[in-house]
Amino acid sequence: MKHLGEFKTFLEGQVNLNKTRIETLTDRVETIENFLWGGDLGGIIKRFSSQGSWAHKTIIKPPGENGFDADLLMFVDPVPGWTANHYILKLRSLFLESKTYKDMVGLKNRCVTLNYAGDFELDVVPCVVERPGHTHRYEVCNRTDDRFEPTDSERYTEWFQHANNLAGGDHLVHVMRLIKYLRDTKTTFSCKSVLLNTLVANQISQADINYRPSYFPDLPTAFRTLISRLDHYLQGRPDLHKITNPVLPIEDFNRHWDHDKYANFREMIHKYRQWTDEAYSESDEKQSIKKWRRIFGDEFAKGADVLSEEVTGSLVPIPHFNVQRFRDTVQAVKLVGLGRARLGSARFALGTTTSVRVEQPNDPYFNQGDAPPARKWAASRNHRLRSSPSCGSSHPI
């Protein structure tokens, strides 16, 4: 089932970055821009532009108390005699000389960072425009290798937005937020945002504008469509292959990956695709919610009452079992010999029969690697009880 209302609530309440935090970012960036315009680099600055997830509108709420990341491009004129290293170090010096920013400054290979602790980290990226005698109009600065690298982030943003428009309804943007939520909260795969954006957006073609009612009518269908297409693409490519910037083929995104990370990503997307198909196709409302939770966690459809009925409905009576013979449930389970039954899901009736729920070896939640091995409990050989799958592990993939 689709659960359109639950997806909307989940996206707005759990995934999307709070509006106030976006407003805070915008205000602080404006202050930083004014600071830089008035500094020693003011004479060569041409303009500023957002980059990455901020520009693509795919920033999500960071897990826990972590801050989010945002990128700001600073377009500058070339300075005769300056190498790539000069632009980065000069920018850092300006911030270090400021009472406001000196304790917030960090240094990366292609940018200077300002860390607003617990809120966000802003990467300020110098971008040199039209260096004399060079082919590429825009170049970022690789400080470590002291060389210039071609880039065109604004054209990339236009390309991504075009794919979003083909799908319609901002569905690509929202699907990317959901996939990034999986990446950041489940931590079952590693993939840089620009690489993830490229792989997913590449699954949309011009023809999709004619098939929106079938493949992109709403968010859950769009999610299923793109996860399915991405899985099909990856399963056809078992080995790490070259993935380039769609608007600047000379730029290779493989620098963000290696063979092991790719293999793991490929495996996990395949698993999520299977789970998505099951959740989407499930006709029982509560079972469907439970299956969507296997993907997104217990925050999905948080108010839905699917736990108690599912657990009590899976209880199996044990005949001739007198609860009064035992001191407590722990002793009862031990003496009956049910092995490592899951006590949190065991219930003992105050009568002559008792129902106990235990995890089975064929429980699909656990066979899928949905919990650590220590939690994959099963009934003992002499007392196997048949029951339905659990209501979702506290460690879903």
Image (cartoon, rainbow, N blue to C red):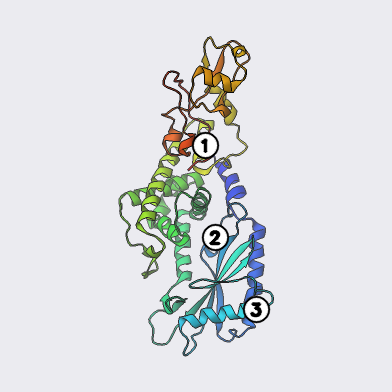
- Tag 1 near tag 3, CB within 8 Å: no
- Residue position marked by numbered label 3 in the rendering: 35
Q: Earlier in the sequence, mark 1 or mark 3?
A: 3
- Tag 2 near tag 3, CB within 8 Å: no
Spatial CA distance of label 1 from label 2 is: 32 Å
Circle on res. 57: 2
Above/below status of 22 relative to 87:
above
Could you tell me the amino acid type at mark 2?
A: Lys
**Does residue 392 appear in this view?**
yes
- Image point (41%, 29%), residue name: 362
Residue 280 pos. (x, y %): 46, 38
**Does residue 218 appear in this view?**
no
Q: Nearer the viewer, residue 244 or 395?
A: 395
Above/below status of 77 relative to 290:
below
- Residue position marked by numbered label 1 in the rendering: 393
- Image point (48%, 46%), residue name: 217
Q: Nearer the viewer, residue 51 or 213?
A: 51
